[in-house]
Amino acid sequence: MPAFIIRRLAQSVFVMLVVAMVAFLMFNYVGDPVHQMVGIETSMQEREALREALGLNDPPLVQFARFVGHAVQGKFGLSYQYKRPVAELFEERLPATLELSLVAALFSLVIGIPMGVYTGLHRSGFLSRIFMTFSLIGISLPTFLIGILLIFVFAVILGWLPSYGRGEVVAIGGWTTGLLTISGLKALIMPAITLGMFQLTLIMRLIRSEMLEVLRTDYIKFARARGLTDRAINFGHALKNTLVPVITITGLQIGSIIAFAIITETVFQWPGMGLLFLQAIHNVDIPIMSAYLILVAFFFVVINLIVDILYYVVDPRLRVDMGKAGGHG
Amino acid sequence: MSEPLLNVAHLRIEFNTRRGTLVAVDDISFDVMPGEVFGVVGESGAGKSLTGQAIIGLLEPPGRIAAGEIRLDGRRIDNLPYGQMRRLRGRQIGMIFQDPLTSLNPLYTVGRQLVETIQTHTSMNHEEARRRAVALLEDVGIPAADKRIDHYPHQFSGGMRQRVVIALALCANPRLVIADEPTTALDVSIQAQIILLLKQLCEQYDTAVILITHDMGVIAEISDRVAVMYAGRIVEIGGVREVVKNARHPYARGLMGAIPSLHRRVEKLNQIDGSMPRLTEIPSGCAFHPRCPQAFERCRRERPDLVRVGESQVACWLYGRTS
């Protein structure tokens, strides 16, 4: 197991280097950084001096090494728009996005798994059909439309929930959270549902089809023939065997939720990373864009690492050093 | 002789399909005595496995019991409510499936699966159940059982897994075990061991066995009595010696003739020409008549019922008294 983790870590580092390369190229070749920083009246000499001072005349490899070195320390330079360090901006925005994403993911799992199990067990039941129809809506309606519909119903007509923003937040250390205030929680409901809806239906349908598959296997028939209770069979034996693909998809989806919170954040004016990123694109704010790229890649890599480790926890057949060590489950 | 442990009377299993009702098992009756090994033999699709599934109450829809009764110890079990039938499974009737590689849940240690099953049917605490599980694994001949109990199914070979499956089927000490092709998926060299183990354990635990197989050799080896099935019906039923040595139904004789023997010098193995009819096109009269070398006019028109011939019962017009 440790050997496996080390191998995985090495691969992750490699992926991150490749992504850093792309971010670096973007930095250097999409427009001229010097051009972005100075005014029209700056002389050629001054520009050249700035270029030298910024190290832009060094060989590309040296520049790249420096870029990576800084990135590791969390230094992504100054935002062109805000004239503030990107790291600082991210620190302000990241809690909002992570909170939204995690609540959305939690929402999709907590609702999606039971619905999937239910529809898998009662294939042709009345409730199953309602769930399946509902899931079709969730899969086919675009996120922004769901968001706008929710705003229309719950904010405009009923006036129960705020239509934009994050509500009151409480700062704990460097982290701001909206989970501790009523208005923060109320503001979180609609964005989280909007963001989690697609994943919810995806997870539900995935669990359903996996359950149908697993329930046909011999070991489930044998479990029935041994007189085990339905509860033990459905949840202990069947559901656990559906988990490997579910973990894979959930892992990938959490990455996507974070990365694609952009749309939801725009619809609800959620002060998170996505909104910051969209503004950065508008204003060709390269430091923010490249830092965002690296950050999202980092999330994906970390989540994938966790997913791989979870496989090992769930499925004993994947544990490499089983031969002599025997059962350590 | 004592009361039968299991009594199957006029069992009929049907499948409702879009093209109408198919009869997969048609009016079969037999008894299984306590502690006896009862063989059920026939080609694929003869309805052997369905009969087994019906007895343990695990027929899969759209298959259903359309008529007949199944009694265990005189108590009717084919119409029990789901919860009561569940408590019967494993506790009174155990089942062993064909493929040991897929019969065990890959995610749990064999010990966990044993302990779970034992605790479902008894009031043992975890420690006691585990001790019983180790003892069972020793009984089925797994070396170093106290260590192996914490291993996962994929760490066992096919033969060893089938031993674990047997231990699982026997762990609540059922009175009847239905073994559905228990050796078909195994290496020939291991088949004999598993069959002997099954026989020996069932004697030790005083458990009756319904051994479903297409392998006449296996039946001849350990059965007490045997039923030969063809196209959903029992064509011959009797003591194993009588049926093996003195098969009367032409189909049963064909099956016996297909057993290779070291004692008889034969140029080539006998085979029964043709194949079993599909459920949608079961012939009129005796279902075997298109393949039967001795068929005559009556076989095509009327269906024979079981009649006593010597010590067996045979469904064939060759032996009909009223012909």
Image (spheres, grey):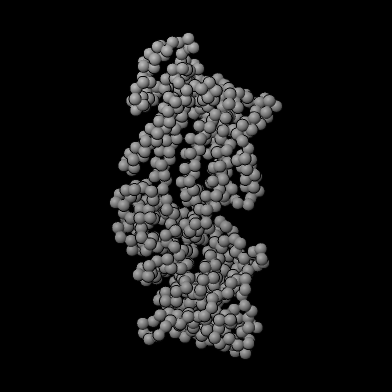
Residue B45 placement: quadrant: bottom right
Spot occupied by residue A196 in the image (x, y as percentages of width and height): 56, 35
Q: Is residue A97 left or right of residue B100?
A: right
Residue A237 can be seen in this image? yes
Please state which of residues A39 and B236 is positioned toward the viewer in this rendering.
A39
Q: Is residue A245 left or right of residue A192?
A: left
User: What residue is at 57 percent from the left and 51 percent from the top?
Assistant: A121
From the viewer's perspective, is residue A169 above or below residue B19? above
User: What residue is at 55 percent from the left and 49 percent from the top?
Assistant: A209
Spot occupied by residue A263 in the image (x, y as percentages of width and height): 57, 30
Work out which quarter of the rendered image holds the N terminus of chain A and state it: top left
User: What residue is at 59 percent from the left and 48 percent from the top?
Assistant: A119
Residue A312 placement: quadrant: top left
Please state which of residues A284 and A229 is positioned toward the viewer in this rendering.
A284
Residue B111 can be seen in this image? no
Spot occupied by residue B128 in the image (x, y as percentages of width and height): 37, 53
Spot occupied by residue B4 in the image (x, y as percentages of width and height): 51, 73
From the viewer's perspective, is residue A24 above or below residue B220? above
